[in-house]
Image (spheres, grey):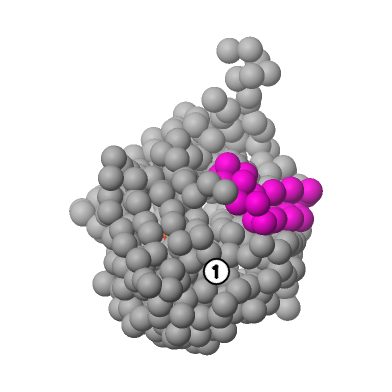
Amino acid sequence: MDKLRITGQRTLQGVVQASGAKNAALPLIAAALLTAETVQLSNAPQLMDVRTLAKLLRSLGAQVEQDGGQIRLSAAAVNHYEASYELVKTMRASVLVLGPLLARFGQARVSLPGGCAIGARPVDQHIKGLQALGADIAVEHGYIVARVATPSGRLRGARITTDMVTVTGTENLMMAATLAEGETLIDNAAREPEIVDLANLLRAMGAQIRGDGTSQIRIQGVDALHGASHRIIPDRIEVGTFLCAALAARGDVTVQGAEPSHQDALLDKLREAGAQIDTGADWIRLRADALPGGRPRAVSVRTTEYPGFATDMQAQFMAVNCLAEGAARMTETIFENRFMHVQELMRLGAQIDIDGHTCVVHGVPQLSGATVMATDLRASAGLVVAALAAEGETVIDRIYHLDRGYDAMEVKLRGVGAQIERISDRISGK
Ligand code: EPU
C-alpha cells in the first residue's frame, strides 16, 4: 500500500490547477446510461472512483474511453443491469446506476452498499423515491432488485418529498424522472452545484428540468434522450483543500480553474481566520504569509447541506484550526462518524476534545510530524493539510483513500513548493 511522506513547513507559493469535480463526474457518467447515443465529458478528473464507475458501466455492456480529461461514453449496447457487490462495496456512488437503468431498461439489480467508515449511509430515500415513480423494489440477497411495474413499462411522474436532503438520492431520482411519463416534483432536493451540473448535462441531452439549485426540482418526462457534450465543473472540495493547505502553511497560493461562486461558505470562514482572499472569474488566491500574529484565528463551523459549510471540508478546516490562535467548535451534522481524523491529528500534537457530533479544537502554536493513518478520503486530505504545516516529517499510510478522490495531489502540491513524495511498496518491493 502506498504512503505519502511529507516534510512540513515548506513555503507554499504559486499557482495550482484544479481538476474537474469527482462528485459531479460520477453522476454525469451514470447519466450516459440514459441514452443510446454518445455522451462526451471534458475536464474529467483522473481518479480511482472514476475508473471504478467506468468499470461498472463496461460490465453493463457500455463503452467507456478516457483520454486525459476527455471521457467518451456509449451505452448503445447495454445488456446487463446488475451492479455487483464487488464494485459497489468499493464505491457507494455505484448506486447512481440504479435510476438510469430502471428508467431506460425497466430493470436493475444493484448491490446494497453496506457499512461505510463515515456513517451508516442508507439508500432508503433512493428506494422510496423510485417506488413513488412506479418501480417495484425488493431487497433480496443483499441486492436492490427493481422493476418498472406500470402498465406502459415506463416510470410515471410523481411528487416526492425526501425525508432528508440527499445528494446522490436527488441525482438518482432526477435521472429516473427524465424518462418517466408525466411530471415529477422532487421536494427537499439537494442544491449542490453538482446537482446543477447534472441538470445541465441532462438538459443538453433533451431532458426538461426546472428548479435545479433550489429545493424543488420539476422534471417533465420525455420519450428518449440523445447524446451531448459537457464540461465538468471544478472540484470545489479539491480547491478548498488547497486553500486550507495554503492557510495552514501560511503561504500564498492561487488555485486556477476554480469557480469562486461555489465556495462562498468556505471563503467566508477562511477570511474570518485571517486569510486574504482575492477572486477572479476562474481563480482564487489565498494569502496567509503576513497573518497578524503569525497564526490563523480559530473559527467555529457547523457542517450543513449546500450552500452551508460542506462536510467534505470539515477535516481540512479542522487541520487549520489545530494551528490557530484560540479555540473553535466544529459540529458535524451530515454524517454520524466523521471525526476519525481527530485521533490522527492528535498524534501530530493537536489538542481536540470530542463530544458526540462536536469537537472543540484548541489551537497549538506548532504540530510535529509523525506516522499517521488515513481512514477515509477527506480525513486523509485533512492529514495532508496538517502535515504540510507540521514541523518535521509525517508519513501518511493507506493513501489509497486519497487516490479515490484527488487527481495527482502530490504532484500538484510539489508544484507550489511542498516537499511531498509517494512511497510505493510496489517499487520498494516490500
Ligand atoms: N441518507 C439517508 N438515506 C438515504 C440517503 C442519505 O439516511 O437514502 C443520509 C446519509 O446517511 C447522510 C445524509 O443523509 O447522513 C446525507 O447523505 P447524502 O445522500 O447527501 O450523501 P451521498 O449522496 O451519499 C454525497 C457525496 C459525499 C458527500 C455527501 C454530503 C457523492 C458521490 N458523494 O454523498 O462525498 O459527503 O454527498 O455532501 O456525491 C466525498 O466526496 O468524500 C464524499 C463522501
- Give the answer, above or below, for where 350 lies relative to 98: above
Seen at 59% across and 59% down, the residue is 33
Seen at 55% across and 69% down, the residue is 194
- Give the answer, above or below, for where 281 lies relative to 94: below
Residue 296 position within the rendered picture, expressed as x and y whole percent measured from the top left: 50, 62
**Residue in front for this viewpoint, 156 or 389:** 156
Is 326 on the left or on the right of 52, as rendered? left
Seen at 64% across and 79% down, the residue is 206
**Residue in front for this viewpoint, 55 or 241:** 55
* Viewer can see residue 210: yes
Residue with the mark numbered 1 = 194
Location of residue 130 by image quarter: bottom left
Screen quadrant of the N terminus:
top right
Is 266 on the left or on the right of 73, as rendered? left
**Which segment is the magenta one?**
56-78
**Residue in front for this viewpoint, 123 or 429:** 123
**Residue in front for this viewpoint, 162 or 73:** 73
Tell whether position 357 is magenta: no
| Ligand 1 quarter of the rendering | bottom left
Is 69 on the left or on the right of 337, as rendered? right
The amino acid type of the residue labelled 1 equals Glu
Residue 17 position within the rendered picture, expressed as x and y whole percent measured from the top left: 73, 58
- Mark 1 vs ligand 1: CB below 8 Å: yes
Screen quadrant of the C terminus:
top right
Location of residue 306 by image quarter: bottom left
Residue 200 position within the rendered picture, expressed as x and y whole percent measured from the top left: 62, 76
- Give the answer, above or below, for where 396 lies relative to 312: above
Seen at 31% across and 73% down, the residue is 132
- Give the answer, above or below, for where 183 lies relative to 266: below
Location of residue 184 by image quarter: bottom left
